[in-house]
């Protein structure tokens, strides 16, 4: 997904225009009609505000780092692979 498209998607999640499908840990999540367009199992989608804001900040940071490294050619910057590990408790 292109960087601008990803940022727009996350901003839409913050204002409840689009949702994020949940496929794991869906025990307490209710069903929503919006889940049908994402083909989420059991129509389980959500709008996680804190995680979305954090990930949006991460994308902004990646964009600014790419501008410095690639001489302002962020239009063609595409995410190929991104891993986030769950912290140990």
Image: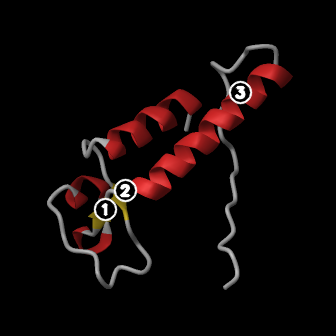
Query: Which secondary structure lies at badge 3?
Result: helix
Coloring scheme used = secondary structure
State the image quarter where residue 23 is shown: bottom left
Look at discs 3 and 1 and give the one toward the viewer: 3
Q: Seen from this angle, which residue lies furthest right?
A: 69
| Image point (44%, 77%), residue name | 24
Q: Say if 35 sits above or below 66 in the image.
A: below
Left or right of 27, for residue 23: right
Identify the residue position indicated by label 3 in the image.
64
Contact (Cβ within 8 Å) of mark 3 with mark 2: no
The image shows residue 67 at horizontal and vertical percentages of: 75, 21
Question: Which residue in the structure is indicated by mark 2?
Answer: 20
Ranked by sequence position, the earlier of labels 3 and 2 is 2
Badge 1: few (under 14), some or many (20 or more) residues near its Cα, within 10 Å? many
Pinpoint residue 15: horizontal percent, then vertical percent: 28, 41
Disc 1 is placed on an element classified as strand
Could you tell me which quadrant the N terminus lies in?
Answer: top right
Say whether marks 1 and 2 touch (CB < 8 Å): yes
Instruction: Tell me what residue is drawn at x 38 percent, y 59 percent.
Output: 48
Which residue is at the front of the view, 87 or 34? 87
Q: Specify the label residue 46 is tagged with.
A: 1
Question: Of circles 3 and 2, which is in front?
Answer: 3
Q: Residue furthest left?
A: 33
Whether 21 is drawn above or below 58: the answer is below
Measure how far apart labels 3 and 1 are at the Cα level. Answer: 29 Å
Q: Position of residue 63 (x, y in %)?
A: 67, 29
């Amino acid at each position: 997904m292109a960087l601008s498209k990803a940022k727009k998607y996350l901003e839409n999640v913050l204002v409840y225009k689009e949702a994020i499908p949940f496929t794991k840990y869906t025990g307490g999540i209710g069903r929503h009609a919006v889940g049908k367009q994402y083909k989420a199992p059991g129509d389980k989608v959500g709008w996680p505000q804190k995680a979305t804001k954090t990930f949006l900040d991460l994308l902004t940071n990646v964009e600014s780092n790419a501008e410095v490294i690639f001489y302002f050619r962020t239009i063609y910057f595409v995410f190929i692979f991104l891993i986030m590990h769950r912290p140990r408790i």
